[in-house]
Amino acid sequence: MKVIEQIKAPVKYEMELFEKKFSLAMSSRVALLNRITHYVVNRKGKQMRPMFVFLVSKMVASGEVNERTYRGASVIELIHTATLVHDDVVDDSNRRRGFFSINALWKNKIAVLVGDYLLSKGLLLSIDNGDFDLLRIISVAVREMSEGELLQIEKARKLDITEAVYYDIIRQKTATLIAACCSLGAASVKPNTEHVERMRKFGELIGMAFQIKDDLFDYGEDKIGKPTGIDIKEQKMTLPLIYALNQASEKDRRWLINSIKNHNTNKKRVKEVIAFVKQAGGLTYAVTQMKKYQQEAQEILLSYPDSPYKEALLLMMTYVIDRKK
């Protein structure tokens, strides 16, 4: 049994029902839109976000979920999908999860409009049902994701990212969405309780570990996940690189920055940068930090009574840092 299937097992019924509700939430009177959203629904990934929503809500409410939980999961997925569609346009990317992206098939103009449509569908689903607390959680996440992306672009131009700024960027870019899923799961069943903030923090910590793991793939030998050195080619400052820069002598530091700014498409030079970062202990340091976040997240979970949902969330945390892509 795959790890993801094991994690999903305690919420299998909810996930199947969610898929039906999610498809309905996307429907439109415009045939072109339906064709595109059908394409999107049938190319779903691991669906970790709705899984977080259902596992958290069942853990904090002793196995309970309600209509708000389903709506919350749908809103997160609608808004997340909207940001992915827009991301592909921004990044000029033709592939998404191994399939053609919407902009590759239907061009940028349609992709931007589809993203806007999904965003408004998500907002209306909350407003029409009076789920203003859930809408607030998601809206904050979208604002932070946009800020995180822009902060990264601003800093990439100068390559002056400190470790603290790096954490700010990944907290906003990646962790905020997982935090929203977890706090939303809690808020759907236990609104206005301490569970909402506790689960938000739990999701944020997992999100931080998740992103550091992603950064580490850039230095892997294996042909899995994204190709080695792609972050360096894109001038993205990741934790192993920031650590190596901080440890380097002035001469090495100048060489590193010059390599990333001016020679980031030179394969040999990129390999040399990767070797330097490894030598400087950048990977070891990043792994230590990743495990620290995982440990903190685990402590939050351990304050809850044992249940299949808690077990699945603990398994999810192990999966986040052990995954191979």
Image (cartoon, helix red, strand yellow):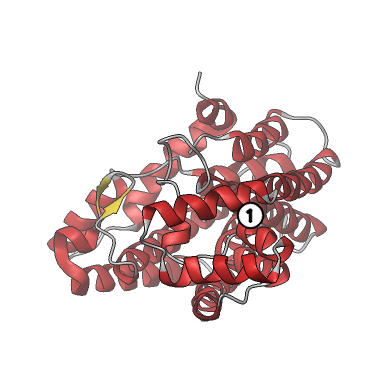
Q: Is residue 163 left or right of residue 220?
A: right
- Closer to the camera, 173 or 214? 214
Q: Position of residue 4 (x, y in %)?
A: 52, 31
Question: Farthest front residue?
Answer: 251
Q: Position of residue 73 (x, y in %)?
A: 51, 52
Q: Position of residue 287 (x, y in %)?
A: 69, 44
Q: Quadrant of residue 60?
A: top right
Residue neighbourhood size for the residue with mark 1, other residues' Cα within 10 Å, grouped as few (<14), some (14–19), many (≥20): many
Q: Is residue 78 left or right of residue 188?
A: left
- Closer to the camera, 3 or 193? 3
Q: Is residue 159 above or below residue 317?
A: below
Q: Is residue 143 above or below residue 93?
A: below
Name which residue type carries label 1: Pro
Task: Determine the residue positioned at 40% across, 46% down.
Answer: 227
Question: Which residue is label 1 attached to?
Answer: 240
Task: Determine the residue positioned at 49% across, 32% down.
Answer: 13
Task: Determine the residue positioned at 73% across, 52% down.
Answer: 202
Question: Farthest top residue?
Answer: 1
Q: Position of residue 246 (x, y in %)?
A: 72, 65
- Closer to the camera, 173 or 35? 173
Q: Is residue 14 above or below residue 218?
A: above
Q: Is residue 90 visible to the viewer in this orientation of the structure?
A: yes
Q: Is residue 205 left or right of residue 277?
A: right
- Closer to the camera, 306 or 70? 306
The residue tagged with tag 1: helix, strand or loop?
A: helix
Q: Quadrant of residue 309?
A: top right
Q: Is residue 200 above or below residue 213?
A: below
Task: Determine the residue positioned at 47% across, 50% down.
Answer: 271
